[in-house]
């Protein structure tokens, strides 16, 4: 009977018709009535609205539309869109490293272990990794900080690199370095008003940092790299940014990108030591983004990890300076962006906080297991005498030498053009040239509600099909204009791109002068 009663229509209040009830709902006076959607631009999280990510911003959206137009036969003054906006090596034609892909393929399809053409060392690696996976399957979840075996291999890689002990329990595998960077920032952001966490970031910066800071409602504190000295980091500028920040927030974090993105500078060992001393004196947590550590091109430049320098400095620095350093398979000679794999190593982190980090990463279950497998091949590559060694070394050298050549080519061609100035691309995968824009171009940009360098980059895209990112998306000193362009396209295509871009700039300046 109770079930039957629930099926009976509700009685309307005396004197109220169905039509009247419907009218009340439409007017908003009835239950659930007349309401619009719960989630609107006005009710959504305001922190998300503040997030911007220039690398995949409006100019890239337009580039995708132009690609669609070309596929549909719409006439354009170019035959293809060249997306030089992002460091996606394989999308630009770079070939995968054979050993990395063989081991990953074997783990994903173990039947290939019977394939006689695949070297025995790749098969041995795959069997070792599958044995470390639950159910001996790459499709199973791993432990939240990552497969223990892979964490051990990362620790051995770091010990070989730095000559300093590394512990697997201090290493957290992640969905690319970006995921780990956001996790560490989540731990660090706290307080309200004047006690809210301030985060020092370089300008120009990789927009992940400003986006994460906005999403977490932290306070962004800019320190400017010195363009006149190859984008060097100056401790006096750090002190200026810190002093200004302390007037309205609580600076607790110093982010360093080395080698630099978008600027391509490689920091000297002395500079790193100065930064560590600064962090020690000012009680700042250091975040070292070192994902381009394999990408060093300039003569006399060398990669020095923050951890290695920290421990070479010894006490008291090595005992108390808190450091999180990040690496990824997306860059370097690997370029395996789509596998989304990386790690963070934490140094001198409070044990109770480290437990909270372990809890935080457990919420997203685990990083992609195929990415963890590929990461293992990066940190533990073939050794001399292994069947795969010679091919691995040849492929690695070919990628890095080609990038070094393209870094020099980019600088040389841009610096031949009056009005463009490009610092040496010492490392990473990008150039960040400065461009002079005439006053009429600034006025035209203002009339369209665009930043001047966005106006230039959009015109460049519409007329040449070349997609680069305006410097305003990375930050720059007031009154200066830049763009970021990857050096990843094949050499022949890069040369054409550089020449077309240079010609367009000359034409643009003439048009607006």
Image (cartoon, rainbow, N blue to C red):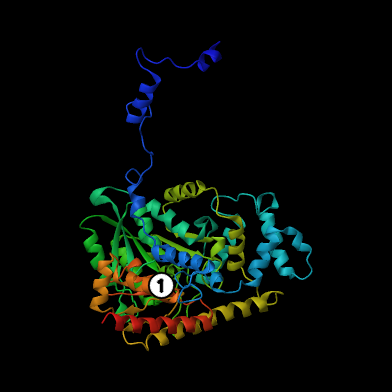
Mark 1, residue position: 462
Between 469 and 361, the residue placed more toward the observer is 469
Q: Quadrant of residue 481?
A: bottom left
> Vertically, is 372 above or below 233?
above
Label 1 crowd bin: few (<14), some (14–19), many (20+), radius 10 Å:
some
One can see residue 416 in this view: yes
Between 333 and 94, the residue placed more toward the observer is 94
Q: Is residue 391 left or right of residue 239?
A: right
Residue drawn at x 54%, y 82% as measured from the top left: 402
Q: Secondary structure at mark 1?
A: helix
One can see residue 164 in this view: no
On the image, the x and y values in percent for residue 75 come to: 48, 72
> Vertically, is 300 above or below 359?
below
On the image, the x and y values in percent for residue 476 come to: 30, 71
On the image, the x and y values in percent for residue 252 come to: 31, 57
| Total numbered circles | 1
Between 490 and 500, the residue placed more toward the observer is 500
On the image, the x and y values in percent for residue 290 come to: 45, 68
């Amino acid at each position: 009977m109770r079930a039957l009663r629930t099926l009976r229509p509700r009685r309307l209040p005396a004197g109220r018709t169905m039509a009247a009830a419907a009218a009340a709902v439409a007017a908003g006076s009835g239950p659930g009535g007349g309401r619009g959607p719960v989630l609107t631009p006005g009710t959504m999280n305001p922190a998300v609205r503040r997030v911007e990510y220039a690398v995949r911003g409006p100019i890239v959206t337009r580039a995708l539309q132009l690609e669609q137009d070309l596929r549909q036969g719409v006439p354009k003054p170019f035959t293809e869109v060249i997306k030089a906006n992002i460091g996606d090596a394989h999308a630009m034609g770079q070939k995968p490293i054979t050993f990395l892909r063989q081991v990953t393929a074997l783990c994903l399809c173990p039947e290939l272990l019977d394939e006689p053409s695949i070297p025995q060392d790749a098969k041995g690696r795959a069997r070792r990794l599958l044995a470390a996976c639950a159910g001996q399957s790459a499709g199973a979840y791993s432990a939240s900080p990552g497969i223990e075996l892979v964490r051990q291999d990362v620790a051995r890689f770091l010990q070989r690199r730095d000559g300093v002990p590394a512990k697997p329990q201090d290493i957290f595998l992640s969905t690319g370095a970006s995921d780990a960077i956001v996790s560490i920032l989540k731990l660090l952001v706290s307080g309200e008003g004047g006690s809210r966490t301030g985060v020092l970031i370089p300008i120009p910066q990789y927009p992940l940092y400003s986006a994460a800071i906005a999403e977490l409602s932290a306070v962004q504190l800019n320190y400017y790299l010195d363009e006149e000295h190859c984008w060097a980091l100056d401790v006096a500028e750090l002190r200026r940014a810190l002093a200004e920040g302390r007037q309205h927030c609580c600076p607790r974090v110093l982010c360093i990108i080395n080698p630099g993105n978008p600027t391509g500078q490689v920091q000297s060992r002395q500079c790193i030591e100065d930064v560590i001393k600064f962090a020690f004196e000012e009680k700042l947590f250091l975040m070292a983004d070192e994902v381009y550590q394999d990408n060093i091109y300039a003569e006399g430049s060398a990669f020095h990890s923050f951890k290695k320098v920290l421990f070479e400095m010894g006490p008291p620095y090595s005992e108390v300076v808190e450091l999180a350093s990040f690496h990824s398979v997306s860059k370097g000679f690997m370029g395996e962006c789509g596998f989304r794999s990386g790690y963070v190593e934490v140094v001198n982190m409070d044990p109770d906080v480290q437990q909270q980090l372990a809890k935080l990463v457990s919420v997203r279950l685990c990083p992609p297991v195929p990415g963890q497998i590929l990461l293992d091949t990066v940190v533990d590559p073939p050794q001399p005498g292994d069947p795969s060694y010679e091919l691995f070394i040849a492929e690695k050298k070919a990628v890095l030498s080609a990038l070094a050549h393209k870094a020099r080519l980019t600088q040389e061609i841009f610096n031949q053009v009056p009005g463009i100035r490009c610092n040496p691309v010492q490392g990473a995968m990008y150039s960040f040239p400065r461009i002079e824009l005439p006053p009429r171009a600034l006025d035209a940009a203002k009339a369209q509600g665009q930043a001047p360098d966005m106006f230039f980059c959009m015109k460049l895209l519409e007329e040449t099909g070349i997609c680069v990112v305006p410097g305003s998306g990375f930050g720059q000193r007031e009154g200066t204009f830049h763009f970021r362009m990857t050096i990843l396209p094949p050499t022949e295509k890069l040369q054409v791109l550089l020449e077309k871009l240079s010609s367009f700039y000359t034409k643009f300046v003439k048009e607006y002068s």
